[in-house]
Structures are given as C-alpha cells and as structure tokens.
Image (cartoon, helix red, strand yellow):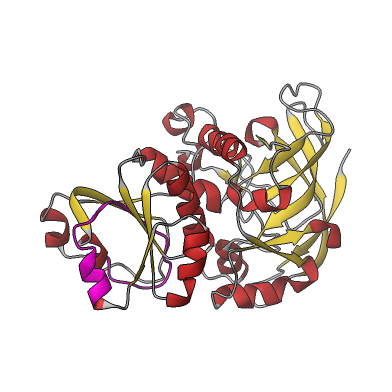
Amino acid sequence: MTTIAKAYAAQSAKTPLAPWEFERRDLNPHDVQFDILYCGVCHSDLHQARGEWGNEVFPMVPGHEIVGRVVAVGSSVKKFKVGDLAGTGCLVDSCRECNSCQHGLEQFCENGPSFTYNGYEQDKKTLTQGGYSNTIVVHEDFTLRISDKLDLAATAPLLCAGITTYSPLRQWKVGKGQKVAVVGLGGLGHMGVKFAVAFGAEVTVMSTSPNKEEDAKKLGAHKFVVTKDAEQMKSVAGYFDFILDTVSAPHDLNAYLGLLKPKGVMVCVGIPPTPYQLHAFSLVAGSKVLAGSMIGGLAETQEMLDFCADHNVVSEIEMIDIKDIENAFERMAKGDVRYRFVIDMGTL
C-alpha cells in the first residue's frame, strides 16, 4: 500500500524548504519501512538544496542521516522486524552486480548508485527523496541495524559524518602508537577525533580557531595546534603518521604535508569549492601519500555502527525543529554549530 509521506522540500534552488507531501513506494518483498524519528543535517544538504553542485533535480527532500523505528517489513525480509531500530545513510540501492558492489563498495557502483536523495532508484527514472520526512521505504540490504544502547538522535549523524571519517581511518589502519592530526573541528572533524582516540592513537586537533581547544580536549584530543600560529605549526613539522583533513574551505595542502613523517599519509574528506594547489615536492620529499575518501560501503557502515555501540561513540548534536531548517542552514554555512544539527522529525 502506497504511503503518503509528509516532508520539507526545496521546490527549486531559489526557494526555501517548505512543507510538501509525496508518495513513498509500495512495500516490496525485501523492503523495510520505518518511521523517521531523527535526521541529521549535513553540509551537502545545503549545497544540493541550493543547487551549488550542479545536476540537482527538484522537488528535493534532503537528508541522508536517517534513524527511526520499523513499522512494516516485506514478506521476504529476514534482518528486521516491526519495532526494530533502523537507519539509512547516503545510499538506498546499487546494481549489486558490478565489481565495486561485489567487493562491498556500493558507493562506487559502476552502474550508478542510488543516493538517498537527489538521485534515482535503480530503474533510473524514479526520483529518490530523503530523510526530511516522516517515513521511508528502503531495501533491507541498505537498511542498517541500530543498537538500542546508543542515543538515537546522536546516532543519526554517524550515517554520514561518522562513516566518512571512520572509513579512511580504518583503511589506513590508524591505531595505537601512531600520531594523528585532525584538521578542522566541525561536523566531520569532531567525529574524526572521537574515532582516532577510540582506535588508540595520539590525536592532535589543528584549527584556525583557538577557542576550540577546550572542546578538542573534551572530545579526547591530546594536543591542539592553532594553524595560524607559525611557531605552533613549526613545532609539529615531520611529526605525524596520518592527517585527516576535514576542511571544506580553501587551504594550503603543502603546509600540512610538511607535518607528515616520511611515508606519512594525508587523507582529504572535505570538499573545498576550488581546486587544490599542490607542489610535487611536497609529496616526493618523504615519499608521502595524499589520498581522498568518500563514505564507506554497507558492510563497513554497519561495522562502524557496531563499533560505536561497543565503545559508546556518538555525535555531539544540537536538536532543532524542522521549521527552523532554513535558520540551521544559515548557521551551518557560518560554522555556527557544535557539531551537528539533528532534526526531531516529531516536529514535522
């Protein structure tokens, strides 16, 4: 039976998000339907709702940090039952057949993944709509199990900000005995700090804002460097094994590459609006690695959620009413959030 979903949507790149209703699909045999209780607000929601990345499709219901409770399951569903907690991140489907999908990298599906919003289902014609709504229908393979040990609202941002930082730290085997820097202390950066600390690394936060030092220490960071202070930057030259760069504003990568030890690794997860300017010598001197990372696949995302349940890792959040989403967008654009907005969807 088709469900009429209530939502907030952008009808164009020039119009504010406003109430809108649309149809969620009928429940197929392998589908899970869950009522959305909380949805995190990602910076990409703002970019796409404002048409800043190109190729946006409207009307658009943003939101890909989605958690809630299962209200219906298809006849062939094995992993969920009514009443379970569930979540959905940046993906709702993929082809399942290509090399990437076969190796747990659904986010890189060679036939095009189905993103949770501003994308298309695998039929390539049905528009997907996200979590700024009261309910969602997702194939069970792309529905994630959420532990009842975690604060549900603070778990929502793990579905994007969490996996975006967890994945590169795991890929490069960050752990005990390593010195790690996290550049930027925002929605992504604060999760990078929590994970790196949980993995046993010595963690330094690097920020342009001296007033974030107290927060950095509360999150578990061992050291703090003000990047505008030349002496502080000089004091950590050649110091780090790994740098996680979460900054989405223009900045000089060469300065940070100089802080790595030989064979050190720097991974970028932020997306600045302009191309990086990189000197080859910054990499060649020391045989350093510069890499990028997106989100993780489904198995890795579930692994991350299970790790968070075992180690009590969640996001630092500020709860908002859906009616305040435009104000939240404006504050987020100014960096005025510590450290992730989460919408209480009960206010819809």
x, y percentage for residue 17? Answer: 73, 71
Q: Tell me the magenta residue range.
A: 231-253
From what the image shows, is residue 45 above or below residue 157?
Answer: below
User: x, y percentage for residue 63?
Assistant: 66, 56
Q: In the rendered image, which quarter is residue 79 located in? A: top right
Between 298 and 246, which is closer to the camera in this rendering? 246
Give the image quarter of residue 133: bottom right
Q: Residue at x 27, y 72 (%)?
A: 232
**The N terminus is located in which quarter?**
top right
Residue at (42% x, 29% y) in the render: 99
Residue drawn at 47 percent across, 63 percent down? 216
**How many numbered marks does the figure carry?**
0
Q: Quadrant of the C terminus?
A: bottom right
In the rendered structure, does residue 38 fall within the stretch colored magenta? no
Foreground residue, 346 or 76? 346
Left or right of 115, for residue 274: left
